[in-house]
Amino acid sequence: MPEGTLPLYETGRTAERQRTEVRQRVGTKYKQSQARQIAEATIRKEATAKNRPADLINIALEKVVAARLELPTFSTFDTMASTIRTEVNTSICCGIHNRMSLAEQARMLWLLEERDSDGTTQFNRLKQTAQGPSWSHCKRLFTHLQWLDELGDTAVWVDGVAAPKVTDFARGGRCGRRLRALGEDGKTVDIAFSTQNWRKAVLDETRPGRFVRKRFEAMVFTHLAEELRTGDVAVVGSEEYAGWSEQLLAWEGIQEKPADCLVEVGLCEESEAGAFDATSFRR
């Protein structure tokens, strides 16, 4: 059929019959309620150990496909992952809070109230990282660890919480302290999706709380390229663009040129160019 052909139906019954035929051909069933139940149960189970919405959605997709059911819309998966992850994380945090004694809970609140001489709260001190490997720094770190131990038995607090989940919570805490900055509209920008090195690089050291625009743009496009490569992000209408492989020159038209190119760029002398044939260069 010519490009641009659209599926038009005189009646809704015709469209439904054709959809039924397509489902029979590919071996799937249209049971949206059952598909959502499988997705919800999968996300709820996996959210106890995984935190990234993309991971939760991908696993749910696999389960629904394995059940030979027609997939709900992506927005259904996206909303479901966000909602359930919030519920699971809230439940985990409530469990941690309930395993703390009243004295330990009071000490946690004290961290947000007591301030150092520089005006920062003790909560910032809580997230202090180790410095260079010197004797003075080692003694200071030992003192810091003693102070941390006095806050409470954290092993009891996180008892039963999956290790990857604890790591994700800790990473979120580090992001909140170091990478936190404002966009041009004055609102906080969440850059938790990026790597630790990028988070450090995009912050402007001369303007606290601001980004270096060029580095920020490079970070976003680098991450977007990776998401496109893995299939976690798709571009609407991308199938309408020409394939990049079709823009390459045919090998038959350039197989005699590699040796000349080597000479031109200075990788070999003209007298040595004959030693390079097209076949070896292609390999």
Image (tube, rainbow, N blue to C red):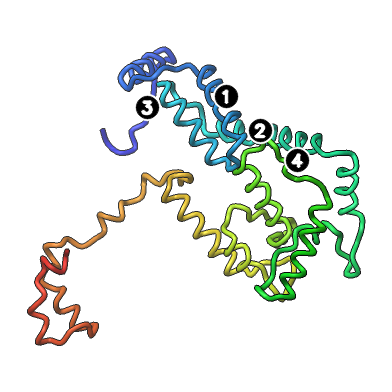
Q: Is residue 182 left or right of residue 32?
A: right
Q: Quadrant of residue 29?
A: top left
Mark 3 or 1: in front is 1
Alpha carbon separation for disc pair 1 and 4:
26 Å
Mark with earlier residue (3, 1)? 3
Residue identifier under label 3: 7
Looking at the rendered structure, which numbered label has been put on residue 157?
4
Alpha carbon separation for disc pair 1 and 2:
13 Å
Q: Residue at x 63, y 48 (%)?
A: 167
Where's the C terminus, which quadrant? bottom left
Residue identifier under label 2: 83
Which residue occupies the foreground of this view, 212 or 42?
Answer: 42
Q: Residue at x 16, y 69 (%)?
A: 281
Q: Are marks 4 and 3 in contact (CB under 8 Å)?
A: no
Which residue occupies the foreground of this view, 97 or 74?
Answer: 97
At label 1, which amino acid type do we have? Ala
Looking at the rendered structure, which numbered label has been put on residue 41?
1
